[in-house]
């Protein structure tokens, strides 16, 4: 149980274009989803927290207009990187938790974004 | 300021050796979790410890939560190449409030087990 999927697993895009990453909880209803960014051999950096039907809460220093997050249902959240630049290249990981245990997060497999 | 300090940051050992990874804080945590992440994949939850002094075992992995709930350790017995990965400790930031549901992570320990 507690499976989270991400799509796509990797994407290459040109500078200036936008990219959407999907995060789905497959076998539970995710009241909260989190988006992280991870640089090579480093820990996870939380970008934003989203609750179903509400606006996302962004961490300090994360541009909300650049990283658009939508959490339209209890099983789907999306992260759109708008006007991507090479410095946005990174490994993006989502996680999901449910109301019964809000501090136990289940992670997706991650999306490798490369902006050329 | 890092709420959770992990050590060591890098560990390279031979198959069969034992090792311990530490996760320390000056703050009290209501619970701590340990995750393992393989390259190119998301972290996988290994264990959650909740009670001070608690010890949990997962095959060759032993997890301990300090009595004061400020630290935790992960001990691996007879490490195998399959144990290679990034180990992360994490916990709810002390204080709650706007941090509800969030986790704060340690810097991670990169473990490499050579055959």
Image: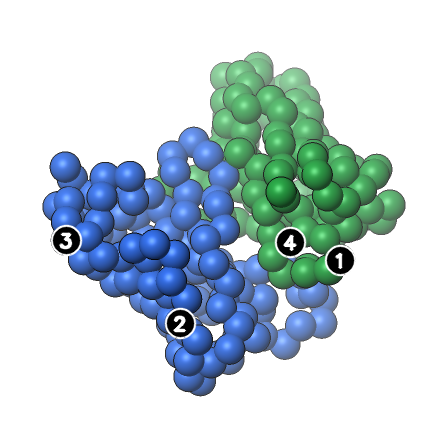
- Write down the chain letter for disc 1: A
- Write down the chain letter for disc 3: B
Quarter of the image where the N terminus of chain B is located: bottom left
Check disc 3: other Cα within 10 Å, few if <14, some if 14-19, many if 20+.
few
Say if labels 1 and 4 share a chain: yes
Label 1 or label 4, whichever comes before in sequence order: 4
Check disc 4: other Cα within 10 Å, few if <14, some if 14-19, many if 20+.
few
Q: Residue at x 49, y 39 (%)?
A: B42
Helix, strand or loop at mark 4? loop
Check disc 2: other Cα within 10 Å, few if <14, some if 14-19, many if 20+.
some
Q: Are marks 1 and 2 in contact (CB under 8 Å)?
A: no
Residue A70 visible, this orientation: yes
What is the C-alpha distance between the residues marked 2 and 3? 21 Å
Residue B23 visible, this orientation: no
What is the C-alpha distance between the residues marked 3 and 4? 40 Å
Helix, strand or loop at mark 2? strand
- Write down the chain letter for disc 4: A
User: In the image, residue A53 lies at what x, y percent?
Assistant: 87, 45
What is the C-alpha distance between the residues marked 2 and 4? 34 Å
User: Within the image, what quadrant is residue A104 found in?
Assistant: bottom right
Chain identity for the colour green used in the image: A
Label 2 or label 3, whichever comes before in sequence order: 3
Which residue is more in the foreground, A110 or B113? B113
What is the C-alpha distance between the residues marked 1 and 4? 21 Å
Residue occupied by mark 4: A59
Residue occupied by mark 2: B55
What is the C-alpha distance between the residues marked 3 and 1? 40 Å
Residue occupied by mark 3: B17
């Amino acid at each position: 149980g507690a499976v989270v999927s991400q799509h796509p697993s990797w994407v290459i895009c040109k500078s200036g274009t936008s990219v959407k990453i999907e995060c789905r909880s497959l076998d539970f209803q995710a009241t909260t989803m989190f988006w992280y960014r991870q640089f090579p051999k480093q820990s996870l950096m939380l970008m934003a927290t989203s609750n179903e039907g509400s606006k996302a809460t962004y961490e300090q220093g994360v541009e909300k207009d650049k990283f658009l997050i939508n959490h339209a249902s209890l099983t789907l959240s999306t992260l759109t990187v708008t006007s991507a630049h090479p410095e946005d290249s990174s490994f993006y990981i989502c996680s999901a938790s449910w109301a019964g245990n809000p501090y136990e997060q289940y992670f997706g497999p991650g999306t490798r974004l490369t902006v050329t | 300021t890092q709420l959770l300090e992990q050590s060591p940051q890098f560990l390279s050992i031979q198959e069969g050796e034992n090792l311990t990874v530490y996760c320390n804080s000056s703050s009290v945590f209501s619970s701590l979790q340990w995750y393992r992440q393989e390259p190119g994949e998301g972290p996988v939850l290994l264990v959650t410890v909740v009670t001070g002094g608690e010890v949990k075992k997962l095959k060759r992995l032993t997890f301990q939560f300090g009595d004061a709930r400020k630290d935790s350790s992960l001990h691996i017995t007879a490490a195998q190449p399959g144990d290679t990965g990034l180990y992360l400790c994490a916990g709810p930031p002390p204080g709650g409030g706007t941090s509800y549901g969030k986790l704060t992570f340690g810097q991670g320990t990169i473990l490499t087990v050579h055959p």
